[in-house]
Image (cartoon, grey):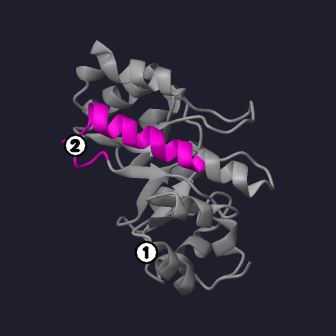
Amino acid sequence: MSLHFEELIQQIHSKKAELVAVSKTRSVEEILSLYKMGQRHFGENRVQELRQKHPLLPNDIHWHLIGHLQSNKVKYIAPYIHLIHSVDSLSLLEEINKQGAKHNRIIPFLFQLKVAEEFTKFGLSMEACTAIIESDKFKNMKNVLPSGIMGMGTFTSDLNQISEEFKLLKKYFTELKETFFPLAEDFKEISMGMSGDYELALEEGSTLVRIGSLIFNNL
């Protein structure tokens, strides 16, 4: 499927969602091409790559960390990261909170929940996520901002399976929102959907779609 960037943006915005352009392995010049077309949200998988690109690009870019994040790497992105999508443990959240305090920032994050079948996918079970939220450590954190959830569908050609996994993510979001964050306006994001399945994700209520190859391969 080939879509012009403007058409893709229109499609995403019509569902009241936002595009996170996945810029991993992409050059500064490629990112600037999208920036000049109005794109401001960019997602990177690796801290090292983000650290190299950040100083070379405009300051008003909103950087999203969408890959697995190790606690010892948080300090490098804490001063400027817009949203961390991949919080999958209490210990990681403690480090984000610690680094947020050091930089006088409240860092927004998403709980990464596992709904895919692959063992290689990271993510919390709903029970583990609930345990974190109910913990005293989490309740005492002042420098993190829970903003929603993230998840990935199984890498499969079975669209029904992917759709059901996205439905489950939406169900998890609704349960967490109603149970723990009913009055929290910032707890609003469902980050799901990539180049191959973003349309399914939009239909199931995604608010952030993470799309890379579909955009950059058509520049």
Q: Which mark is residue 184?
A: 2
Q: Which mark is residue 211?
A: none
x, y (%) of residue 19?
Answer: 49, 67
Question: Distance between the Cα atoms at labels 1 and 2?
Answer: 23 Å
Q: Nearer the viewer, residue 42 or 75?
A: 42
Q: Residues within 10 Å of mark 2 (few under 14, many from 20)?
A: few
The amino acid at mark 2 is: Ala
Q: Quadrant of residue 97?
A: top left
Q: Nearer the viewer, residue 31 or 169?
A: 169
Q: Which stretch is magenta?
A: 166-187
Query: What predominant SS class does the magenta segment belong to?
Result: helix
Say if residue 152 shows up in the picture: no
Residue 205 among magenta residues:
no
**Can residue 106 be seen from the camera position used here?**
yes
Res 13 label: 1
Image: 40 above or below 166? below
Q: In the image, what residue occupies the spot 72% across and 35% down?
A: 117
Amino acid of disc 1? His
> Quadrant location of residue 5?
bottom right
